[in-house]
């Protein structure tokens, strides 16, 4: 276990002005508080915060962060308090320790909601000070290094959450060394056989090519020196998990991997990087498609380097990474390499300035900003995981603005990356000047122009197409807002007509005193509840006008009439019931009916399954909780299910625009002779009559006939009848009937 003076010496090596008194006091305080506590390995518990502090000294972090590492478990695991730490070490350190204490472990054994909420807490704590993340990653790294001491049933859970959350998060913060070590330990724990196999193959390859790395290092150094370029050349193998991931993603065998060996050429200036690139491509042929310039277009985690793959000595493919010393430091340590911590300064500069200096922290802040957009913790976790795991492509707006997106992103993701309003009003796109589909997968260097319309709202299906968390969250919010608007409009329609039937005035403001009764915060919420079928219109009426009896109100709302008045347009729901509902005649309707104009109107409307409904049918609406209105023709046998639920029946009428007719769903059953050409005859009849086949299913087959179920889209009842008549006139068709007719 590292001693007190050794810790101070480690910090003093990179920070001569270190506050020795602070580090000594934190060391002694933490050791006393943890006392005789032990870890699963049997070691004193204090060895853990000490090792976490040692990891952070390797990152050359400031005194306050090292002190926090020593103290990070004291509030949670000992009798220490925030007030006591504030008094002894100052509010800055106290706040950081408390922030770490609030972050409970991400428990994958619990329900997803708990995992998601804990991840939200983690990122919110990071939002206050990024040093919380650095200590948390160092804490997880030491726990992974000692994972073999844990009971076997816990190792898988810890390794899984490391692979899902902490390793990708370290990668997005540019901390590649931490990420690679976390991944390899988790990989060995989760897939021990695969880890062992890859390790053995690497060992065999290493024995076979003992001199290869040294030969290439020497060759490169000499070639560059001959051109007057001073460089440090180092070679290394790919890590086991990196190899495994590439084999999985590209379905390759170990022998097919072409870049197991990689070399880094580290120089002093950016100009030298491009000079070296010229020397290498002159000496060895480059592999097409394997060149990437992350110096001119850095990754979002601040990674900068030139990558190229060449066919080197012994016809071996070799990956080369060319970078400056400053780039290398940031590429390996990421956000921890930032000068904010190198100078030991915590009060001289605002932590928020890191957002402007670091692209990685800028990504983190934008991710955290999603917390304020109303997403549930589960959605937030899902979206953030998507962005953590994806590689990137770089695209441009027509004005040259660079947009970084996950691999596999579409123009929909691009539009939302530019601005949420651009995404919500997107109707099309041009990629490199050509009109393209919105589902096109973008590639590096694409110039994307978004075509917009203010009348557009994003379809819910876009959520399954988008790959970025921002796009998915925005589409989901827009869908919710649109649905809320539709259900609110439907609820207002229902209440207006219910009030009119009772001869009472409907004033939306008069609903406000009764909001608490219906557990609503606003009148809009109440209207949405009515529209969704979660709040009964009769209950709202009764709340405002208690003098209306429940029976009297119901009778007025549905306009009950005596039996025997069917000639006036009333139909009986149930022979044993006294409730009857009015059916508007063609061209004549009461003022209380709700107009229906297809599926694209402003109301949440769908048509009945097993037959649908078409203009010309007498129709009724059934209010389905959480769905909206389902339209049934009155002859539909499915209506019997709602005989005892009169509050769900709505008086509806067709509202057809003759200048812009919609098609409506209908279903027909056809009994046809089993002979060649019959199906062609049926489809030709429907096509000639301008009908549209949405689906066709053989429901019964025999040696002499076939029975088919055909889903059609037609303009109205006359159109449907014309198709049926034409079908019946064909010799090969024995029967053609409407399913619910």
Image: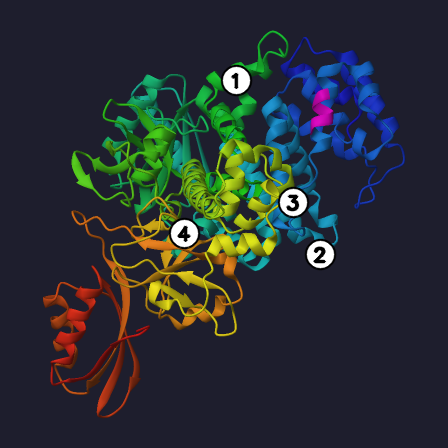
Q: Quadrant of residue 472?
A: top left
Q: Quadrant of residue 231?
A: top left
Q: Residues within 10 Å of mark 4 (few under 14, many from 20)?
A: few
Sequence-earlier tag: 1 or 4: 4
Q: Which residue is mark 1?
A: 354
Q: CA distance from mark 1 to mark 4?
A: 34 Å
Q: Which residue is mark 2?
A: 153
Q: Which residue is mark 3?
A: 114
Sequence-earlier tag: 2 or 3: 3
Q: Which residue is mark 4?
A: 249
* Numbered disc in front, either 4 or 3: 3
Quarter of the figure with the N terminus: top right
Sequence-earlier tag: 4 or 2: 2
Residue 592 painted magenta: no
Residue 444 in view in this figure: yes
Q: CA distance from mark 4 to mark 2?
A: 28 Å
Q: CA distance from mark 2 to mark 3?
A: 20 Å
Q: Residues within 10 Å of mark 1 (few under 14, many from 20)?
A: some
Q: Secondary structure at mark 3?
A: helix
């Amino acid at each position: 276990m590292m001693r007190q003076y050794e810790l101070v010496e480690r910090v003093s090596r990179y920070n001569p002005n270190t506050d020795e008194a602070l580090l000594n006091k934190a060391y002694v305080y933490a050791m006393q508080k943890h006392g005789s506590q032990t870890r699963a390995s049997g070691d004193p518990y204090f060895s853990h915060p000490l090792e976490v502090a040692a990891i952070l000294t390797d990152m050359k972090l400031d005194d306050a962060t090292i002190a926090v590492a020593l103290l990070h478990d004291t509030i949670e695991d000992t009798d220490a308090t925030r007030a006591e730490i504030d008094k002894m070490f100052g509010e800055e350190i106290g706040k950081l320790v408390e922030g770490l204490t609030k972050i409970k472990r991400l428990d994958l054994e619990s329900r997803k909601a708990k995992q998601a909420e804990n991840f939200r807490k983690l990122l919110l704590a990071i939002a206050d000070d990024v040093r919380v993340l650095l200590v948390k990653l160092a804490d997880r790294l030491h726990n992974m290094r000692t994972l073999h001491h844990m009971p076997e049933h816990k190792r898988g859970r810890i390794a899984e959450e490391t692979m899902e959350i902490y390793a990708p998060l370290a990668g997005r913060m540019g901390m590649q060394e931490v990420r690679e070590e976390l991944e390899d330990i988790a990989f060995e724990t989760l897939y021990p056989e695969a880890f062992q196999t890859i390790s053995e193959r690497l060992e065999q390859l290493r024995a076979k090519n003992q001199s290869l790395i040294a030969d290439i290092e020497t060759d490169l150094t000499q070639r560059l020196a001959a051109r007057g370029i001073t460089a440090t050349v180092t070679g290394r193998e790919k890590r086991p998990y990196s190899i495994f991931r590439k084999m999985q993603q590209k379905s390759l065998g170990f022998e097919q991997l072409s870049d197991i060996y990689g070399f880094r050429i580290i120089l002093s200036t950016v100009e030298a990087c491009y000079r070296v690139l010229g020397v290498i491509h002159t000496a060895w042929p480059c592999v097409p498609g394997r060149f990437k310039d992350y110096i001119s277009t850095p990754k979002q985690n601040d990674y900068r380097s030139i990558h190229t793959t060449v066919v080197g000595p012994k016809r071996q493919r070799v990956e080369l990474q060319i970078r400056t010393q400053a780039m290398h430091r940031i590429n390996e340590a990421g956000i921890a390499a930032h000068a904010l911590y190198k100078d030991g300064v915590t009060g001289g500069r605002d932590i928020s300035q890191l957002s402007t200096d670091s692209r990685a922290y800028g990504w983190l802040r934008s991710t955290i900003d999603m917390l304020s957009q109303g997403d549930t913790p589960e959605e937030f976790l899902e979206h953030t995981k998507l962005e953590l795991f994806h590689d990137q492509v770089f695209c441009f707006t027509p004005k040259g603005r660079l947009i970084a997106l996950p691999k596999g992103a579409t123009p929909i993701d691009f539009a939302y990356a530019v601005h949420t309003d651009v995404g919500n009003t997107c109707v099309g796109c041009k990629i490199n000047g050509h009109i393209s589909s919105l589902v096109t997968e973008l590639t590096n260097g694409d110039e994307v122009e978004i075509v917009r319309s203010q009348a557009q709202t994003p379809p819910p299906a876009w959520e399954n197409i988008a790959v970025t968390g921002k796009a998915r969250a925005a589409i989901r919010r827009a869908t919710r807002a649109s649905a809320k608007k539709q259900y609110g409009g439907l609820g207002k329609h229902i209440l207006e007509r219910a009030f009119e039937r009772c001869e009472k005035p409907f004033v939306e403001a008069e609903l406000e005193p009764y909001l608490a009764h219906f557990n609503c915060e606003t009148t809009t919420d109440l209207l949405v509840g009515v529209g969704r079928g979660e709040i009964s219109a009769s209950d709202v009426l009764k709340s405002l006008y208690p003098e209306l009896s429940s029976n009297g109100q119901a009778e007025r709302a549905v306009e009950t009439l005596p039996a025997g008045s069917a000639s006036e347009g009333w139909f009986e729901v149930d022979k044993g019931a006294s409730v009857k509902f009015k059916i508007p005649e063609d061209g004549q309707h009461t003022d209380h009916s709700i107009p229906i104009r297809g599926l694209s109107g402003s109301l949440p409307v769908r048509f009945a399954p097993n037959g649908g409904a078409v203009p010309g049918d007498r129709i009724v609406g059934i209010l389905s909780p959480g769905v909206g209105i389902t339209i049934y023709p009155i002859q539909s046998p499915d209506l019997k299910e709602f005989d005892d639920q009169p509050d769900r029946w709505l008086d509806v009428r067709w509202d057809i625009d003759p200048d812009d007719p919609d098609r409506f769903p209908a279903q027909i059953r056809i009994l046809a002779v089993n002979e060649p050409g019959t199906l062609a005859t049926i489809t030709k009849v429907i096509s000639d009559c301008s009908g549209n086949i949405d689906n066709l299913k053989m429901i019964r087959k025999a040696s002499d006939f076939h029975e088919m179920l055909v889903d059609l889209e037609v303009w109205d009842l006359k159109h449907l009848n014309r198709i049926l008549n034409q079908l019946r006139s064909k010799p090969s068709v024995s029967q053609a009937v409407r399913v619910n007719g």
